[in-house]
Image: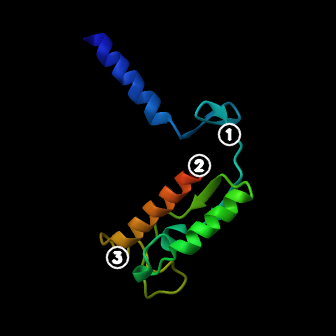
Amino acid sequence: MKSVYSVLLLLVCQVSAMGFVTTKGTEFYRDGKVYLIKSANYWQGMNLGATKEYGGDRERLVKELDQMKAMGVNNLRVMASSEGPDDQPFRMRPSMQPAPGQYNEHIFEGLDYLLHEMGKRDMTAV
């Protein structure tokens, strides 16, 4: 029985590492292969991924991801949270957290949509 658990643990560890970028010395690795990062900032991605009713533009998001992928970009530095209040200047609107302890589910869904679309293009996020 111990051997069954050992095998299961080994499989879970291997599967959980798939797709994640790791380091060895001075090199990045992904799925056991050297991973050369060609990156861009894409702070607006989670907001674009929201539905139109909440300020999103998924058509633009998909188009821009396709353009970046065509240019060789394989990694995006994305904003994964934003804070309000939404009526203040110099903020991403709508924010993911308009007030302490209050969250905008629609922006979470936008982040999920962004990451899903990036996954379709084999892109990673930081």
**Picture layout, residue 70 above or below residue 58:** above
The reply to whether discs 1 and 3 touch (Cβ–Cβ < 8 Å) is no
Q: How far apart in space, not on screen, are marks 3 and 2 (Cα)?
A: 34 Å
Q: Quadrant of residue 76?
A: bottom right
**Picture layout, residue 8 above or below residue 65:** above
In this view, the residue in front, 88 or 52, is 52
Q: Residue at x 43, y 83 (%)?
A: 86
Q: Amino acid at mark 2?
A: Asp
In this view, the residue in front, 119 or 32, is 119
Q: Position of residue 22 (x, y in %)?
A: 58, 36
Figure quadrant of the N terminus: top left
Note whether residue 14 is visible: yes
Q: Amino acid at mark 1?
A: Tyr
For the residue labelled by badge 2, is the local secondary structure a helix, a strand or a loop?
loop
Judge depth for marks 1 and 2 and give the one in front.
Answer: 2
Q: How far apart in space, not on screen, are marks 1 and 2 (Cα)?
A: 12 Å
Q: Position of residue 107 (x, y in %)?
A: 41, 70
Residue matched to label 2:
122
Q: How far apart in space, not on screen, are marks 1 and 3 (Cα)?
A: 39 Å
Residue matched to label 3:
99
Along the polypeptide, which appears first: circle 1 or circle 2?
A: 1
Label 1 Cα crowd, 10 Å radius (few <14 / some 14-19 / many 20+)? some
Q: Quadrant of residue 27?
A: top right
Along the polypeptide, which appears first: circle 3 or circle 2?
A: 3
Residue matched to label 1:
35
